[in-house]
């Protein structure tokens, strides 16, 4: 009988020098990303331009969002494929995604927040507006 062991997800560091598509480091980084996605389906991305505070704020807001009941999350719809709620797919039962239309605007974030939390959730919209958009 085999034992279940936690996989060691690949950690891929992104920096400005790796973001230049004309560089050899871009090709190396692309190979790393492709390999990680093929073998694990995901990877941990690190970037020294993201503070621990921003990282923590993003994960807290994401957890609050995905902890909402499915009945609430499915209210997020869009005519653009994969821009609303994506989930409850039998072949990938653990996958969920939520797109925020106009996520880089105050109006878009506030509209999304009101849809997910009709009685309000200022901490979510403030976190997105103060941390994500300015970054």
Image: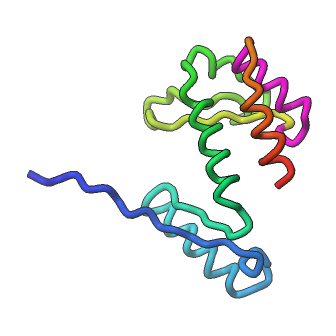
Boundaries of the magenta span = 103-118
| Image quadrant assignment for residue 118 | top right
Vertical comparison of 74 with 52: above or below: above
Is 85 on the left or on the right of 87, as rendered?
right
How far across and down, in percent of the image, does residue 93 sit?
A: 44, 33
Toward which corner of the image does residue 44 lie, by quadrant? Answer: bottom right
Coloring applied to the structure: rainbow
Q: Examine the image and state in which quarter residue 103 appears.
A: top right
Q: Is residue 79 left or right of residue 92?
A: right
> How far across and down, in percent of the image, does residue 40 sit?
44, 59
Q: Is residue 114 above or below residue 48?
A: above
Does 114 appear in magenta?
yes
Quarter occupied by the C terminus: bottom right
Q: Assess whether residue 5 is covered by the magenta stretch.
A: no
Is 110 on the left-hand or right-hand side of 116?
right
The reply, left or right, for residue 90 in relation to residue 108 is left
Q: Nearer the viewer, residue 17 or 60?
A: 60
Residue at image point 51% right, 26% down: 88
Where in the figure is residue 92, as x and y percent of width and height? 46, 37
Position of 95 relative to 85 (above/below):
below
State the residue at coordinates (71%, 62%): 50
Residue at the outermost bottom position: 24
Dominant SS in magenta: helix
In the displayed orientation, state which residue is furthest to the left.
1
How far across and down, in percent of the image, does residue 33 sit?
A: 57, 68
In the image, what residue occupies the spot 78% across and 32% down? 125
Residue in view at x 75 percent, y 39 percent: 127
């Amino acid at each position: 009988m085999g034992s279940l062991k936690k996989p060691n997800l690949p950690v891929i560091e992104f920096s400005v020098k790796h973001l230049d598509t004309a560089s050899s480091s871009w090709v190396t980084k692309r190979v790393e990303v492709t390999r990680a996605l093929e073998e694990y389906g995901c990877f941990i991305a690190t970037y020294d331009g993201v503070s621990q505070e921003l990282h923590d704020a993003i994960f807290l807001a994401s957890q609050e969002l995905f902890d909402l009941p499915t009945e609430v999350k499915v209210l997020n719809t869009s005519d653009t494929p994969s821009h609303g709620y994506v989930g409850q797919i039998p072949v990938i039962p653990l996958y969920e995604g939520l797109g925020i239309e106009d996520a880089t605007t105050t109006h878009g974030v506030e509209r999304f927040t009101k849809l997910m939390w009709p009685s309000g959730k200022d901490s979510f919209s403030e976190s997105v507006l103060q941390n994500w958009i300015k970054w």
